[in-house]
């Protein structure tokens, strides 16, 4: 039992105790959008998550990527859900550019 207690003490929590700040959500949205822009065909959500982690060079919560895809795959959003768990970039996203930053038309971040 001491070994189990030692492992539990060394383990780091898998999810962040505080919700993502608006800026962090925007960075994830930008990374997801870039991944889908580079894709030739629809991409599985799991592959999008892996690519976002590689692009940001840090762990990103699966739920953050999943929520980004789901919330922006609605009419007028940035993405299209072509099948269960598969997404592609919408042809006409209606995105605005502020400086060099793309702004989501629905959420303005």
Image (cartoon, grey):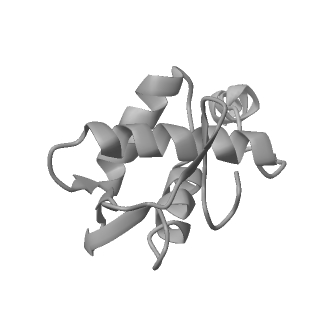
Q: Residue at x 47, y 31 (%)?
A: 53
Residue at the far top: name it. Answer: 57
* Along the line of sight, the residue nearer the viewer: 35 or 19: 35
Task: Tell me where residue 2 appears, x and y as whole percent.
Answer: 70, 30
Q: For this view, does 109 lie left or right of residue 40?
A: right
62 or 88: nearer the viewer: 88
Q: As drawn, is 42 to the left or to the right of 36?
A: left
Please give the name of the residue rendered at 71% of the width and 57% of the height, measured from the top-left corner.
Answer: 108
Residue at left offset 37%, top offset 62%: 92
**Residue 7 falls in image quadrant:** top right
Q: Is residue 80 above or below residue 108?
A: below
Residue 9's spot in the image, x, y percent?
76, 30
Residue 89: tell me if it is visible: yes
Q: Position of residue 42 (x, y in %)?
A: 20, 56
Q: Which residue is painted at 64% across and 28% down in the image?
A: 3
Q: Position of residue 35 (x, y in %)?
A: 36, 39
Say which of 67 and 2 sits in front: 67
For the view shown, which residue lies furthest in the left direction?
A: 41
């Amino acid at each position: 039992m001491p070994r189990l207690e030692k492992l539990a003490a060394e383990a780091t929590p898998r999810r962040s105790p505080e919700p993502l700040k608006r800026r962090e959500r925007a960075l994830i949205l930008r990374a997801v959008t870039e991944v889908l822009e580079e894709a030739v065909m629809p991409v599985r959500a799991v592959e999008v998550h892996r690519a976002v982690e590689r692009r940001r060079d840090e762990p990103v919560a699966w739920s953050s990527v999943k929520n980004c895809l789901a919330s922006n795959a609605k009419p007028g959003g940035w993405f299209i859900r072509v099948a269960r768990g598969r997404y592609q970039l919408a042809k006409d996203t209606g995105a605005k550019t502020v400086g060099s930053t793309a702004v989501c038309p629905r959420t303005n971040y």
